[in-house]
Image (cartoon, coloured by chain):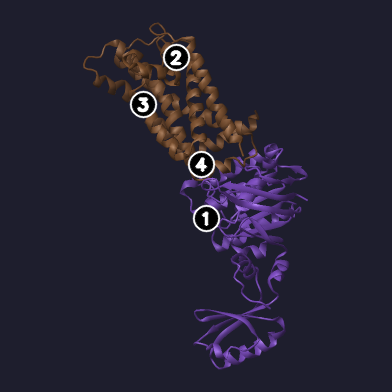
Chain colours: A brown, B purple
Amino acid sequence: MNLTHYKYVFQMQFIRNAGFLIFMALIQILISIGIVIGFTYLLPAPDTQSILYLATGAPTIILIFTGLVILPQQVGTSKTDGFMDFIRTWPVNRSVILSADTTIWLMLTIPGIIIASFIAHFMYQPGYDISWTIIPSFLMIALTSIGVGYGLAYLLSPTTSLAISQVVVFGALMFSPVNFPMDRLPEWLQTLHEFLPIYSMAEVMRASLASSTFDATLGNYINLFIWCVLGFGGAIYILNKK
Amino acid sequence: MILDVQSVTKFYRGKGKSQVIANDAISLQIKEGEVFGLLGQNGAGKTTLVNQIVGLLTPDEGDIHLLGKSVLENPKRARSHCSVQPQSQVPLGFLSPRQAVSIMGKMRAGKNYNSKRLDMLFEALDMGEWVDKEGEKLSGGARRLTAFCMAVIAPGNLVILDEPTNDVDPVRRKYLWEVIRNLTNDGTSVILVTHNVLEAEKAVDRVAIIKEGKILTQGTPTEVNQTVSNQIRMELSLTQELEKEYYPEWIVSSHQNGSRVIFQLAPTHVSNAVDWAKDLVEKGIVIDYSLSPTTIEDAYIELASKKVVASP
């Protein structure tokens, strides 16, 4: 990894997208607050346990939203307007470009997660018990989401990845055990979620934000690791393909 | 020799199992400090060729050597020796021209980056009023010039410019050609991809005309002109209709466009043509006339469209 190259690729991409990034960070703050507050309206008499599910689910939704929805849309745009081909002519390794972009995506998620967690804590005191594992967990979940997002966006046409990202955002909110326990879902969906990364993301995030209430299994970590490698591996393979 | 393209063939998958040939056994060589024009109509295969030179695409057959080494074996090396101005607009977003060009310069040159060159470029292209504005607020021409500066801020051995003058105003186009010529003084070679033939003729040392993936002809502009014909072109502006029966017999071919008539004639008839035209001016039928050698545009149109303009 050439750090000088990393620095300049990062500067170029960060300043170029500055307007979009500020806008997206604000949207994410709204969405995450919306999940914590808005979903309590769905429940007639939310108990602390339900609110804790929402409060510890919101960060996962932000990370899924960033990696699997916003990112594929952005990649689709730069494929369509030819910017992707231009980046590929830069005199740097493709992994440098991927790392610099990943850093930007990671940074984008942080304000929403922190602000929403503070607001949830002061409004409901749902029982946060933050463990040191939050940092590695955050990185692992974010990288998995970003990696899978890159894999999808590079592998598929812009139109297809846009369609998939629409399904993902709806599926993650309503049909995934992120904001509620897994056992409420029908069995076939439970089986599906044992393979997909969303459930593992939610479990690992919960275990770090409310460590006295939730536990994540080793299986969850392994699942995330595999998806992360698949996603980034696929993205680097496609970036280097001629 | 900077670049040696050896019999490069590239297919694209068409509908079903069919294959479309984008480059058909293309060979060309580019020397140090040379401006090489790649002319051809839309879809002729120019951009495909360029993408193979910088290693974005792999030829199906043939090889490309940059400074003596194969691009196929080391595409990253190719990218550090070549810089590219893409045909599509570079979306600058919040980047100002100064930021975009200086970051690119540092990325390419590292510690050898020379910030004076940036000021020199902006001044040479008269970009002063734009340099610190956000890219997305700039006009198409200003963004195109910024992309040009990004390609030439730290030029390696080869700079590839894909339609650099699109969107650029005529005054700054002139400045642009000067900057391109100055690049070659430092030994950088330039590939100029364009279908703007008239401008290219003045700027290039050698040209290749590509059609349907094949090189039809290549050489200096004069050589290319001669492959078509060595005729003289006469252009007349008329005040009134000139009946075809009054056309002199030494005309090889003619073409009327509104009140303008263009003749092709053999060089031996130049003095006849001048006398004839003077006569018409005195009679008030012709306002003015001009004589010029066949341009590369005539050659290009003849070769690329396969319409035979004239036979000597």
Q: Which residue is mark 3?
A: A171
Left or right: residue B196 compared with residue A81: right
Could you give the CA–CA distance between mark 4 and mark 1, rounded to whole angstroms?
22 Å
* Chain name for mark 1: B
Inspect the image, locate mark 4, and give the three-letter code of the amino acid beneath it.
Lys
Are discs 2 and 1 less than 8 Å apart at CB? no
Spot the residue most to the top. Answer: A212
* Chain name for mark 3: A
Q: Secondary structure at mark 1?
A: helix
Inspect the image, locate mark 1, and give the three-letter code of the amino acid beneath it.
Gly
The quarter holding residue B195 reads bottom right
Could you give the CA–CA distance between mark 3 and mark 4, rounded to whole angstroms?
26 Å
Could you give the CA–CA distance between mark 4 and mark 2, rounded to whole angstroms?
33 Å
Inspect the image, locate mark 2, and give the three-letter code of the amino acid beneath it.
Val
Inspect the image, locate mark 3, and give the three-letter code of the amino acid beneath it.
Gly
Disc 4 vs disc 1: which is toward the camera? 4
User: Where residue B86 appears, x then y in whole percent?
Assistant: 58, 49
Which image quarter is the C terminus of chain B in?
bottom right
Q: Secondary structure at mark 2?
A: helix
Whichever of labels 2 and 3 marks the residue nearer the N terminus, that label is 3
Left or right: residue A23 compared with residue A143: left
Q: Which residue is mark 4?
A: A79
In this view, the residue in front, B83 or B51, is: B51
Circle 3: is it few (<14), some (14-19), or many (20+) Cα within 10 Å?
Answer: few
Q: Which residue is mark 1?
A: B141
Q: Residue at x 57, y 43 (%)?
A: A85
Q: Which residue is mark 2?
A: A204
Whichever of labels 4 and 2 marks the residue nearer the N terminus, that label is 4
Are discs 4 and 1 less than 8 Å apart at CB? no
Are discs 4 and 2 less than 8 Å apart at CB? no
Q: How many discs mark residues in the rendered view?
A: 4
